[in-house]
Every structure is written in C-alpha cells, then in structure tokens.
Amino acid sequence: MMRQTQVTAMAIDSDLTQASHEVTAMASDGDVPSLSGGHGVSGQASNTPLTRKNLARLNALSGTVEDDIDSAYLFDDDTDDTMEKTSTTDSGFEQRAYENGIWCPIPSHPCQGLSTMENRAAQHRTSPQPSEHAHQAYCTGISRSYNEAGAALLVQSKIMRDYNGNDFNYGKQCSRAITEIPSQDFNAGLSNPEPDVLEGLYTEVLPDHLHDNALHKKNSLSFCHFAAEFKRTDSNFHQARLQAAYDGAVLVNARERALAEARQDGTVPAAAIDKAAEELAVFTCVTDGKIAEAYTHYYEDGQYYQNLIGCESLLGYPNRGRELIRNTQDYARSKSYELANLLGANLEEEEEEAMVLKAKKAVAKRWSFWPW
C-alpha cells in the first residue's frame, strides 16, 4: 500500500512539473494572460506559482479537465491575505456572521447562570440618581441629537460610568479596531471589530508575561469584558445587535485563549480555570440613547451565543436604563480584575470613594507636620 501511494505521488508530481513548464512556456509566448491579474510580458518567463487554482486556469485554456484527486497537500496555498474582508456595516455581514457561528437569527438558548445575571443587572444602585432637572436635560439633548456621534457623547457623559480618573488600572478605548486577534474560523473573512466603547485593563499595568493578551499594538487594553455599540435614535438597532455579537465573540475568544494558555502552562490550578471557564463574564450594551439593551456572551459546542439580560428605558425617571448599563459595566470590570489576578497579576479595583479617602488621608498627613 505504501509503495502504491509513493508511485501515485511521483506520477502526480511529474504531471505538475510538466504543467508548470507548459504554463511558463505559454506565458513567455504571450499566449496566456498573467495569472497575477495583468498581462504577460512578451519574451519573459512568468514565475507563476503552481497552485490548484492556477492549474485549473491552465486546464481551462488547454481544454483538459483535472482529475478529482485528493492531493491538496501537493499545491501551494491559494489563500490571499489581501482579499477584501466583510465589514460590520456591509450588507453581507449578517450572513457571514451566521456562517462563522457568531450570530444566531433566533434567540440564543438559555445558559447556566443567566437568571442570576438578569437579577444582578436589574439591581438598584446605592449611588444617587441625577436630579430630575438633569434627567430632563438629558432627554431633551438625546431627542435633538443629530447623528450617532451626538447620541454616543450624551450616553457616555450622562449615562455610562467613566472609570478614567477613578481607576488608574482600568479604562476605555472608543471606536478603535481590535487588531490583535488571530485569524480563526469565527472571524474568517471579517474585518476587525471596532466597538464604539471597549473597556478593560491597561496592558502596561500588567506583568510582562501577560502582555500577550493585549488587543491592540500600542496603548492597549487587555482582559476586556465589556463593549458598547451606539445607534442613532432613528437608526438600525438590528445592526447594532449584530455588531455587539461580533464584539462579544471576540472578547469571549480572547478570554478562552488566556485560560487555555494558563492551563497549558500549569501555573494555575485546573479547578480555578474550570470555574472561570464556566462563568458568564463577557457583556455588551446596545443603545440609541432612548433604550438600553444588555447582553451576555459565551461559547458552547462551536457556536457563540448572545443572551439578553436586560432591556430598560433611558427616558423614564428614576432612570432604570442607567442602572442597567452601570451594573453591567461594574460586573464586567470585576471579571477583568479576576481574570488578570488569576493569571498572576496583583491588582486591586480602585473605587472613587476609596481614592477620595486616600487623598484626604494624604492631605491630613501632610498638614500634620505643622505645629498648629
């Protein structure tokens, strides 16, 4: 059997060598258009790679038909890294996302812990609501917002939590593409996602051995568990959900890769990794400034799922939509810290109140040196 396979391979290789010579000879005579897309130069041999696609072109020109031989390993790779990829705003994105297993046209099946997350997202916050006057100012502003950027500015400044200045380890990036994601089945043929808001730990505060988890090349975030997508009040909410599904799949994939590397290294107890892998830890928010939807994301059996955990109005008072978004943000932040610390970081969540108290103590200590 081995002898027969060797003979067959040698025969195929001989045929391919002859075909390659024919392609070169025909190209030098000007009889074959250049396989790179342009026209061949008369009198110059064309260094055309011998791929299955190029051989098919030769066969079409010569009138022969290629035998159906399972010998793809004999050919160079036909993949073109420069091929145009489908953007999240293209009309074909939904179909491609469905084929890649990151979008379900029907509601995702319930998962373990979903009801717990629904209750957590719906909790009332201890921090006070804005005054009714401030709330009315927000409602007026959102009704007058001309485009998506205007609505996004209001939501970020008046509704969402902003950790910048309150937590020096944790922050956000706005409308920045996530570039440091390996090419895999789930993102095949798709351009890099570009969440309107992405929150996570600054890579620079992490130990060096965790810098491979960065989602950008420079000034990056790592261990991100929250993303948001905005739409105009009269725009397409469905498209924002689609974009959020892709954002969530990318963040789930990044989390799973980090856990898989830790499992392989053996530096983290297997039981701790198993527990982290079973948790609902990645969340997205979709809003047009009037309605807020929060989702959790996870991976199971080759499919990425997106489950709704809450939907609230941002126009009612008290503002339940504001609480939904902030509860989701806070929980996602806690998961970023948990994962980083599980993998060897030693970071503490910084809260605004704790930082204010720390500043007051520093001032008191400084003035204690004076005799009065």
Image (cartoon, rainbow, N blue to C red):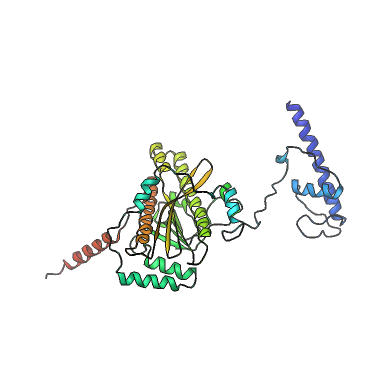
| Up/down of 243 relative to 370, above or below | above
At a point 41% along the width and 37% down the height, the residue shown is 270
Residue 341 appears in the figure: no
| Up/down of 263 relative to 194, above or below | above
At a point 30% along the width and 69% down the height, the residue shown is 132
Residue 134 percent location from the top left of the image: 33, 71
Residue 128 appears in the figure: yes
Q: Residue furthest top?
A: 1
| Up/down of 317 relative to 253, above or below | below
Asked if residue 117 lies left or right of residue 217, the reply is: left
| Up/down of 68 relative to 357, above or below | above
Total number of numbered discs in the rendering: 0
Q: In which quarter of the image is the C terminus?
A: bottom left
Residue 322 percent location from the top left of the image: 36, 61
At a point 38% along the width and 46% down the height, the residue shown is 115
Asked if residue 231 lies left or right of residue 12, the reply is: left
Residue 43 percent location from the top left of the image: 86, 58
Q: Residue furthest left?
A: 372
Asked if residue 75 lies left or right of residue 306, the reply is: right
At a point 23% along the width and 64% down the height, the residue shown is 362
Quadrant in which residue 168 is drawn: bottom left
Quadrant in which residue 122 is drawn: bottom left
Residue 41 percent location from the top left of the image: 83, 60
In front: 250, or 34? 250
Q: Residue furthest front?
A: 316
Q: In which quarter of the image is the N terminus?
A: top right
